[in-house]
Amino acid sequence: MTKSESARINKELKALVNEYRDSYEALRQKSEAKYKTTLQPGATFHPQKGFYYEEERAAFNSVCDRLREKAHALVDGATLDIMAQNTAAPSTEAVNVVTLLNSRQNVSADEIDQLMTKYGTDCPMVYKALHEKAESLGYHDFKPHPIAQAAENVEAMNSLIDRTFGTTAAENSNMVVTTAAFNVTVDSAFPAEE
């Protein structure tokens, strides 16, 4: 995925969560205002979290469904590209090198690093196999492949979309914190162009 495509998805996902937040607040205030009109003169108003009436809750639920669908559509397009890169088949030469390396017991961290650079840069599967070999030998200073990390971030994004865009989630959480957490995950999964 290109940097400009990542930045576009970043911007659009953040716009969706902002719309979610704004819609919730507008419908919650509408519900609260309607409730206040039912109070007897001089009665004390005790605010509550969420909606006072099912009509506004149902309207917000429709907003959540629409936003969740849009967010998943954005992420799904990127997921296909990242997953294709993440599951690309290694060359025969790379498979032979990894197989031979796995049969050896005395392998240095430098040797693994060289092989990761030569064979793993273009193939996350080879990189992961070499990373696992390094871990088994006690070498823990190798970072995950950027494509594999991107795949994990996108999976986390999909899960967060389902947890965020819902009526119950809005009513039971702090919307400022929810929006901020969503934006942090968006920045991890789809970094904006610098």
Image (tube, rainbow, N blue to C red):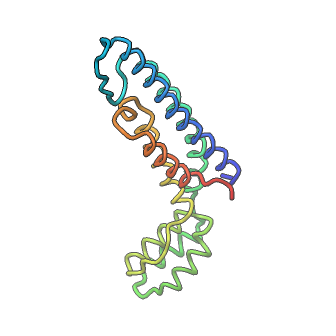
- The number of callouts visible is 0
Q: Position of residue 118 (x, y in %)?
A: 62, 75
Q: Nearer the viewer, residue 98 or 160?
A: 160
Residue at 30% x, 11% y is 40
96 relative position to 56: left or right = right
Q: Nearer the viewer, residue 156 or 91?
A: 156
Is residue 100 depicted above or below 79 in this figure? below
Q: Can residue 138 be seen in this view?
A: yes
Is residue 144 depicted above or below 52 in this figure? below
> In this view, which residue lies farthest toward the front?
42
Residue at 36% x, 32% y is 171
Quadrant hosting residue 74? top right
Q: Can residue 54 be seen in this view?
A: no
Q: Position of residue 149 (x, y in %)?
A: 51, 60
Q: Where is residue 151 in the image (x, y as percent from the top left)?
A: 52, 54
136 relative position to 110: left or right = left
Q: Nearer the viewer, residue 165 or 31?
A: 31
Is residue 63 depicted above or below 78 in this figure? above
Q: Which of 107 and 187 is in front in this view?
A: 187
Is residue 3 depicted above or below 133 in this figure? above
Residue at 45% x, 34% y is 165
Q: Position of residue 56 (x, y in %)?
A: 42, 18
170 relative position to 188: left or right = left
Residue at 54% x, 65% y is 145
Quadrant including the C terminus: bottom right
